[in-house]
């Protein structure tokens, strides 16, 4: 049976900004190219709210990923193949 989140149905899972209680992880400068793959991985593997933010820095554009649940951030950093260099 497919487990569907109410946040997904209401389109409230992905946020366009990072609330102060979110736990953030900054990716490398070249990893912004994988946004669609990264977002698909998060959608299918995790259940909570998240945000993807692009930061403009002097060294280039960096992508930051934020999660409401700290456990999901830990799982993301350990299991997501797109975070490895």
Image (cartoon, rainbow, N blue to C red):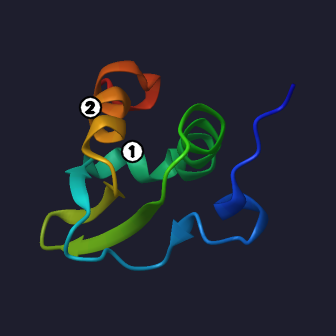
Q: Quadrant of the C terminus?
A: top left
Q: Tell which tag, 1 or 2, sits nearer the viewer.
A: 2
Residue found at x 30% / y 21%: 78
Residue found at x 12% / y 73%: 58
Disc 1 or 2, which lies upstream in sequence? 1
Asked if marks 1 and 2 touch (Cβ < 8 Å), the reply is no
Residue found at x 66% / y 36%: 44
Picture mark count: 2
User: Does 32 sit above or below residue 45?
Assistant: below
**Snapshot quadrant of residue 61:** bottom left
**Snapshot quadrant of residue 65:** bottom left
Q: Quadrant of the N terminus?
A: top right
**Snapshot quadrant of residue 45:** top right
Q: Tag 1: Cα neighbours inside 10 Å, few (<14), some, or many (≥20)?
A: some
User: Does 9 sit above or below residue 73?
Assistant: below
**Residue that numbered label 1 is attached to:** 31
Q: 47 or 29: nearer the eye?
A: 47
Q: Position of residue 62 (x, y in %)?
A: 28, 60
Residue found at x 59% / y 36%: 41
Label ID, residue 74:
2
User: Does 26 sit above or below residue 76?
Assistant: below
Tell me if 62 is positioned left or right of 6 in this view. left
Q: Position of residue 12 (x, y in %)?
A: 61, 72
């Amino acid at each position: 049976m497919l487990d569907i989140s109410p946040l997904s149905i209401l389109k409230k899972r992905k946020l366009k900004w990072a609330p102060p209680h979110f736990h953030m992880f900054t990716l490398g400068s070249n990893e912004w190219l994988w946004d669609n793959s990264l977002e698909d991985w998060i959608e299918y593997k995790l259940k909570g709210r998240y945000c993807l933010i692009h930061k403009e820095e002097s060294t280039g554009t960096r992508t930051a990923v934020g999660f409401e649940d700290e456990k999901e951030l830990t799982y993301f950093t350990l299991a997501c193949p797109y975070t490895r260099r």
